[in-house]
Amino acid sequence: MRSNPKNILLLILSASILFPFTLQAATFGLTDIPTEFKFNRTLKQGDTVVPDVSYLQFVLNQSQSTQVSATGAGSLTGLTNFFGAKTQSAIIRFQEKYRDEILTPAKVANPTGVVGLYTRNKLNQILASLFAGTYIDAESTTPLSTTLANSAATNASNNALNLFN
């Protein structure tokens, strides 16, 4: 089969019929997070807590200043369940960004990179505003709806093509 657009489209459509659960599981957006979900456990580097870490990466990636990664592991199109160095670095930036709501009430001078009580409270506040459609990050250059749509489309396309490699 030659690589022309019609053949690629046919391949993707065939894959979605033959492997619907594989493609569906590969797409991830706000609608995949249960509205009743709350961050309620302490998370730290090295943890592999499902689904908390991937949800954490999703929330952190909503702002450029706290983004885990622009591409690859930890990005909106590559969320993982591993709390690695990139996620820890993003949490440190998150704690610094929201210093008055996280560090000050915890009486901590420097960010820890650990998702403790005050960090969880702020994450839950942001997650609630994402669900409500009221989240606005002044530093973000991409509207959230565009980010989510692009994330899902890229993830589905990449995974459909990977099925046949």
Image: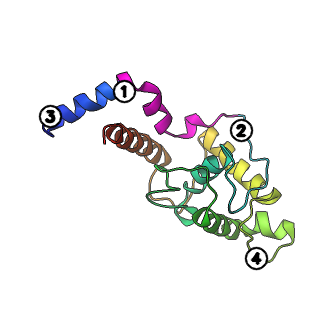
Circle 1 sits on which residue?
16
* Spatial CA span between label 4 and label 2: 28 Å
* Spatial CA span between label 4 and label 1: 48 Å
Residue 30 within the magenta-colored segment of the rendering: yes
Mark 4, Cα crowd under 10 Å, few <14 / some 14-19 / many 20+, is few
Mark 3, Cα crowd under 10 Å, few <14 / some 14-19 / many 20+, is few
Amino acid type assigned to the residue bearing label 4 in the image: Asn
Circle 2 sits on which residue?
37
Can you name the residue that lies furthest to the front here? 165
Circle 3 sits on which residue?
1
* Spatial CA span between label 3 and label 2: 45 Å
Front disc: 3 or 4:
3
Q: Residue at x 83, y 73 (%)?
A: 108
- Asked if residue 26 lies left or right of residue 2, the reply is right
Whether pointer 4 and pointer 1 mark residues with C-beta atoms closer than 8 Å, the reply is no
Residue 96: image x %, image y %?
69, 71
Residue extent of the magenta highlight: 17-35
